[in-house]
Image (cartoon, coloured by chain):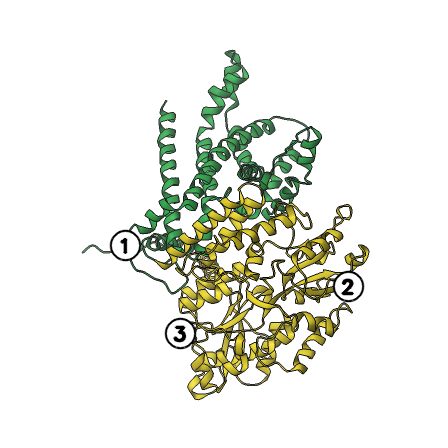
Chain colours: A yellow, B green
């Protein structure tokens, strides 16, 4: 009996210890897509022998299930050379980045790093997390300048540290049914913000709970027109340029869309009624100002089986005539400076940059894209648009709008704090709790403090 | 040299059974706490490899000049000052009520406990609808009653934190009530009978018998509720995310944002250590007060 008790005790302790150890396991385990070999190859491979190696790529939870990335990795693995496995970051968006920040800070050696927006791109370059790509490209006989041209991001030291997978431009998507019901002609070609507001007013129908316009709660909506005018975000002395009148005008303009013109949910409505980021797909909004990444959403009939046709047009420009620009950003990937397989990682990000845009229905981040490739890209969108758009319509908006470009985000010293401050203070102004001047002054003051604090 | 006594098999079993919790405590609680202390004295305030340059009290000094951090402490204090007494009074009243015999007592107790086991995200969604300042049922009712400017609830600078407190009380009331109920049921009925014979009324019995008898439990709840109120993060994040502006940005939310959004890990650690000190001081004062009260 005593012996039995002892055995049982030991078994119980064993189970508890196993549970404890299991709980310590790494959640970001490798999830191999089809065709990827076992990870045991990684440690035994030596790059200098030019044998295929296994590299790992950080992807957030949503992207790890997205066919764009799954197919790209599978196709790359099928080439028979280096193999790619995913290192899945729990959560999406901000949560995934936060997890990746911690991993990178602790010296993680995952070979390929995802850099979803300009703020992360800048931060990771400055932190030394990314390996310079120029030498890696030379070793691989890749002429980065020739392939990517003006879309190749370069730092002050002349090096490139990441490659974009698409050029994210801003467009206006519109719901043709709402236009038809209101008997309003579809917008096309160059137009101004005044025309946008007038159009949205005609589309807005409070009885049917239809708004003519939809914009989300990202910080850059609050300074959109200032960015269109390409007003610098920092002064020459490095401090914030938020006291430039263009930023004040931009904030007032955005607030007025909901509060004064009532063409879209006011900030208060948006926040308290928790309007979803994909609310346009409900069919209750006439137009939606958003980035090109939305093309993947609006053509995803499986997730959003919409029964209305949609159209696309270029972003309106300020009436003053000094802001004929759309805003651009782009997702990117870089090579971890701690990677043991930098050359293999470079080859893979180079492959992604030249292929992901095709699957993502995005603008290629490359200099010389053939007309045939462009047409194929546009035809792909047309094919999945359920008859909503034509190649000609898309071509006019995406490749032939005649608009210049300006950076979408404020990226530079203190950018995370500035981004949040713009939202906090802008919010106080938009819900009527602070005057416009006070809000702008507070943004300027807090931004300067953040910049100084980062430079100390 | 004295010979080390070999542990008996019973002692060995005890050690083995305790080992997992000690190992877990060591890895997941003690080491992170110690690391937070270390981080608060170094300069790891941006994305990059761990920077262990010792900066002394710089991060702590910076906390006192940081408007947002100080606002966070004040918001948390404001939250606790309202939340703790409201919570304790309501839960005690509710416990007294459901301690009586009445129809559907079991069903009522189950209903009271439901918010506590509900998913916090679902709770946040429901309360957002209830407190919708434009189309929500509460404001529609207030407008029907003739209130011309009903509150903005989560959308108002002056009402956001109060609204969060209301929801938090609603969620956590059940736990406190159940604990109070258990304490009330532990009070000897003989005491009440004796007091009744002596002519004591309901209020006198409550003050002279119930309150002293449940004081250890009350003290326990005051401490745990207070600590919980300072550590409140999830519900604030879900309901207001600290807004509008920074009107409901409590210190735990501020610490999280400083660490994981702005990557100012050392600065956030200093704020966390100061929060720990604040809670420790308040708890010590309460200990002292409770001892004195018990002696009297």
- Which quarter of the picture shows residue A158? bottom left
Tag 3 residue: A157
Tag 2 residue: A309
The residue nearer to you, when weighing B111 against B268, is B268
Give the position of the N terminus of chain B as an image quadrant.
bottom left
**Percent x, y of residue A156:** 41, 72
Crowd around label 1: few <14 · some 14–19 · many ≥20 (10 Å):
few
Q: Look at discs 3 and 1 and give the one toward the viewer.
A: 3
**Res. B243 in view:** no
Is A43 placed left or right of B117 in the picture? left
The residue nearer to you, when weighing A152 against B265, is A152
- Chain letter for mark 1, please: B
- Marks 3 and 1: same chain? no
Query: A445 above or below B144?
Result: below
Mark 3, secondary structure of its residue: loop
Residue B5, disc = 1
- Chain letter for mark 3, please: A
How many discs appear?
3
Query: B125 above or below A117?
Result: above
């Amino acid at each position: 009996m005593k012996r039995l008790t002892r055995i049982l005790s030991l078994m119980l302790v064993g189970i508890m210890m196993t549970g404890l150890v299991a709980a310590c396991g790494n959640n970001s385990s490798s999830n191999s897509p089809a065709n990827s070999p076992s990870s045991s190859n990684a440690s035994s491979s030596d790059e200098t022998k030019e044998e295929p190696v296994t590299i790992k790529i950080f992807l957030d939870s949503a992207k790890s299930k997205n066919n764009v990335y799954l197919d790209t990795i599978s196709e790359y693995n099928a080439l028979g050379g280096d193999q790619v496995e995913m290192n899945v970051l729990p959560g999406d968006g901000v949560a995934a980045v936060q997890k990746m920040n911690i991993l990178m800070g602790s010296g993680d050696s995952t070979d390929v790093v995802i850099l979803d927006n300009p703020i992360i791109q800048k931060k990771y370059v400055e932190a030394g997390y990314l390996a310079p790509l120029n030498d890696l490209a030379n070793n691989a006989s890749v002429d980065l300048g020739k392939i990517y041209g003006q879309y190749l991001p370069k730092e002050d030291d002349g090096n490139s540290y990441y490659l974009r997978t698409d050029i994210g431009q801003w467009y206006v998507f519109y719901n043709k049914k709402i236009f038809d019901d209101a008997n309003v002609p579809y917008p096309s070609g160059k137009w101004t913000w005044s025309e946008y507001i007038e159009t949205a007013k005609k589309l807005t129908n409070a009885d049917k709970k239809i708004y003519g316009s939809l914009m989300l709660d990202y910080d850059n909506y609050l300074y959109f027109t200032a960015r269109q005018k390409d007003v610098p975000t920092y002064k020459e002395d490095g401090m914030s340029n938020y006291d430039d009148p263009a930023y004040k005008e931009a904030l007032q303009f955005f607030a007025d869309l909901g509060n004064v013109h009532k063409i879209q949910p006011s900030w208060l409505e948006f926040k308290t009624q928790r309007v979803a980021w994909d609310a346009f797909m409900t069919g209750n909004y006439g137009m939606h100002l958003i980035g090109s990444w939305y093309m993947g959403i609006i053509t995803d009939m499986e997730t959003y089986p919409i029964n209305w046709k949609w159209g696309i047009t270029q972003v309106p420009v300020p009436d003053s005539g000094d802001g004929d620009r759309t805003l651009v950003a782009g997702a990117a990937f870089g090579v971890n400076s701690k990677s043991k397989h930098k050359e293999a990682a470079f080859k893979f990000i180079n492959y992604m940059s030249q292929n992901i845009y095709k699957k993502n229905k995005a603008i290629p981040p490359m200099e010389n894209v053939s007309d045939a490739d462009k047409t194929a890209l546009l035809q792909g969108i047309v094919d999945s648009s359920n008859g909503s758009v034509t190649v000609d319509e898309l071509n006019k908006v995406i490749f032939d709008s005649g608009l210049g470009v300006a950076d979408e985000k404020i990226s530079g010293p203190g950018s995370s704090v500035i981004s949040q401050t713009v939202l906090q203070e802008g919010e106080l102004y938009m819900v009527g709790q602070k005057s416009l001047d006070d809000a702008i002054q507070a943004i300027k003051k807090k931004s300067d403090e953040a910049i100084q604090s980062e430079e100390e | 040299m004295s010979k080390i006594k070999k542990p008996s098999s019973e002692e060995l079993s005890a050690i083995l059974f305790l080992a997992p919790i000690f190992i877990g405590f060591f890895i997941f609680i003690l080491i992170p706490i110690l690391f937070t202390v270390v981080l608060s004295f170094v300069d790891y305030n941006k994305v990059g490899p761990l920077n262990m340059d010792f900066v002394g009290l710089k991060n702590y000094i910076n906390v006192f000049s940081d408007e947002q951090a100080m606002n966070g402490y004040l918001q948390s204090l404001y939250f606790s000052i309202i939340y703790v007494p409201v919570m304790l009074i309501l839960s005690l009243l509710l416990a007294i009520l459901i301690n009586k015999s009445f129809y559907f007592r079991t069903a009522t107790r189950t209903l009271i406990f439901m918010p506590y086991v509900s998913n916090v995200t679902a709770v946040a969604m429901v309360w957002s609808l209830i407190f919708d300042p434009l189309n929500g049922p509460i404001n529609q009712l207030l407008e029907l009653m003739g209130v011309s400017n009903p509150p903005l609830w989560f959308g108002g600078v002056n009402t956001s934190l109060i609204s969060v407190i209301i929801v938090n009380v609603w969620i956590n009331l059940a736990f406190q009530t159940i604990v109070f109920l258990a304490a009330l049921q532990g009070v000897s009925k003989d005491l009440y009978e004796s007091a009744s014979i002596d002519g004591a009324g309901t209020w006198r019995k409550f003050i002279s018998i119930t309150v002293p008898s449940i004081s250890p439990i009350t003290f326990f709840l005051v401490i745990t509720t207070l600590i919980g109120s300072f550590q409140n993060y999830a519900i604030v994040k879900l309901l207001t995310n600290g807004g509008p502006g920074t009107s409901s940005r409590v210190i735990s939310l501020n610490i999280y944002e400083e660490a994981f959004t702005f990557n100012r890990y050392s600065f956030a650690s200093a704020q966390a250590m100061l929060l720990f000190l604040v809670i420790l001081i308040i708890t010590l004062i309460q200990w002292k007060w409770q001892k004195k009260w018990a002696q009297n």
